Amino acid sequence: MLTTFDPARVFLKDLPLTFLGEVALRTAFAYVAVFLFLKLSGRRGIRQLSLFELVVILTLGSAAGDVSFYEDVPIVPVAMVFVTLLVMYRATTFAIERSKRLESWMDGKPVTVIEDGLYRLESLEGLNMSSSELFMELRQKGVEHLGQVRLAILETDGDVSLYCFEPQDVRPGLSVLPPPHRTVVQEAPAEGLYCCTRCGWPERLRLGQRAKCSRCQSENWAEAISRTRVQ
Ligand SMILES: [Zn+2]
């Protein structure tokens, strides 16, 4: 039963102090093994890891962590984990490079999420991505409203590629700003152009008018913005 706080147990348990030297050696082994793995895997960097690469990296990190400080984890089986992972990683990337179908199955396909200033609802619904996440991406790329966007494509690495309208082609669109800068209403507080907050569809509403979006049937509106994008 663990009832008392025992510093000896918490800090070193029953291991001899010399074990610390062994930890240093084990960590050096893990370091070299991870380094070799990354060099031999042929990857250039860690940006844009695909889902399957992330799984490989997590498994690798777990094996490297365990062998570093568990006194009962021998080094040779961990070395085998590294070799096996490396072989499987190389085999998978080899297969992916040769089969477009396998590639899109493993990594997914780029998906168009915005077209001509409007959401592609069917894309967002199938993506497990909320509009607030997408809005954040758009804000970080300097977009203020959907009317500035000609095409937005969600890439397989989770990044959003953006193609904007020329300033003269920008149309009134749905604001992508967070709540304090964007008021959502069901009833128009003044006559003007409003955009459906679900799909971006613009509609002119009279004072006090409630309306259903003719594109997606949503009943929430935000005032349309028509500012052009400052580069
Ligand atoms: Zn709508």
Image: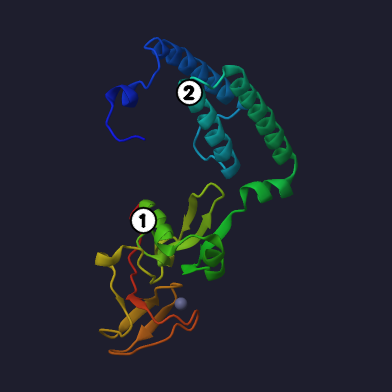
Mark 1 closeness class: few <14, some 14–19, many ≥20 residues within 10 Å: some
**Which residue type does callout 1 highlight?**
Arg
Q: Residue 82 in the image: x percent, y percent?
A: 61, 25
What amino acid is labelled 2 in the image? Tyr
Q: Nearer the viewer, residue 150 or 58?
A: 58
Q: Which residue is the site of mark 2?
A: 70
**In the depicted structure, whether residue 132 falls above or below residue 189:** above
Residue under the image location 55 percent in, 30 percent down: 60
Residue at 62% x, 53% y: name it: 109
Image check: 161 left or right of 90?
left
- Nearest-to-viewer mark from 1 and 2: 2
Closer to the chain start, of discs 1 and 2, is 2
- Disc 1 secondary structure class: helix
Q: Secondary structure at mark 2?
A: loop
* Image x and y of residue 15, in percent: 40, 17
Of 86 and 158, which appears nearest the observer? Answer: 86
Q: Quadrant of residue 230?
A: bottom left
Instruction: Residue under label 1, please give it.
Output: 139
Q: Is residue 94 left or right of residue 180?
A: right
